[in-house]
Image (cartoon, rainbow, N blue to C red):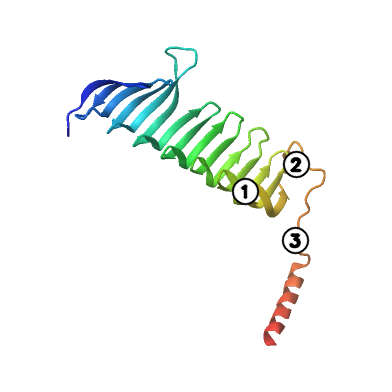
Amino acid sequence: MSARQIRSFFTATTHYQGEADCQNRRSGVGQQVQRNGLLYEGSWKDGLRHGHGIVYRKEPGTTDLYVKIYVGAWEDGRKHGFGVKYYKRGKYVGFWRQDQRSGRGFMWFDSGNFYMGHWQADRFHGLGILLEGRTGNLYQGEFRGGKKHGEGMYVHSRTGQIKRGFWTEGVFRTGTLEDFNRNQVLWPTIYPIPEIKLVNFPEVFEEWMDQYSKALQI
């Protein structure tokens, strides 16, 4: 293993101070400040962010006030593995793949919405749960490309109804609607949804089986 030495590098847009290898590449632990106000502290390998590291953003109008915006794993200069990202209007905790949210993760939005489930290429994708903070409504099911897509269940918390079925590109296509906890919600619908069932099921079933047996004899 080549020995590392402490180095200080300046370019037109960055200033690095930390460990470097014999080829003067950032390797080991170091800090880099960028002209655009971003600061990185953490591990490096072959001149790229690699391992555990933290990114800070300088607050506008200040000289030394930095706010943390990412803490987690890096690979070959990109966010990769488990990490926490702080957005201006939310927070993500979960897994990354080549700088994009991919795998299992949680996302809190300033609007009050909350998502937990699978991600792919920075979007909801796969099985997940989306809670709408403003209404309290909840969707649990399949997503594709950030939209409800596939089989799922949508709970209307204020009216006390559950919609079950299939979505396409965020639009409900087919399914059922049923009541739940009707007497405990704030704004129940005027009329309850009637229960759908067969009348005189034993007699109907017996008649159906009789007709089926006769059909087999033809």
Residue at the far bottom in the pictured view: 218
Looking at the rendering, in which quadrant would you find the C terminus? bottom right
Q: Which mark is residue 197?
A: 3
Instruction: Give the SS element for disc 3.
Output: loop
First along the sequence among labels 3 and 1: 1
First along the sequence among labels 2 and 1: 1
- Mark 2 sits on what residue? 183
Nearer mark to the viewer, of 2 and 1: 1
- Rendering quarter of residue 111: top right
Q: Is residue 45 left or right of residue 199?
A: left
Q: Amino acid at mark 3?
A: Lys
Residue drawn at (40%, 20%) of the image: 35
Nearer mark to the viewer, of 3 and 2: 3
First along the sequence among labels 3 and 2: 2
Image location (x, y in percent) of residue 157? 69, 40
Q: Amino acid at mark 1?
A: Glu
Instruction: Give the SS element for disc 1.
Output: loop
Image location (x, y in percent) of residue 144? 56, 48
- Mark 1 sits on what residue? 169
Q: Is residue 149 left or right of residue 173?
A: left
Residue at the far front in the pictured view: 12
- Rendering quarter of residue 67: top left
Q: Are marks 3 and 1 in contact (CB under 8 Å)?
A: no
Image location (x, y in percent) of residue 28? 26, 29
Q: Amino acid at mark 2?
A: Asn
Instruction: Give the SS element for disc 2.
Output: helix
Number of residues whose C-alpha sits closer than 10 Å to that of mark 1, classed few (under 14), some (14–19) or many (20 or more): some
Tell me the CA gap for discs 3 and 2: 22 Å
Pick the residue in front: 152 or 52: 52
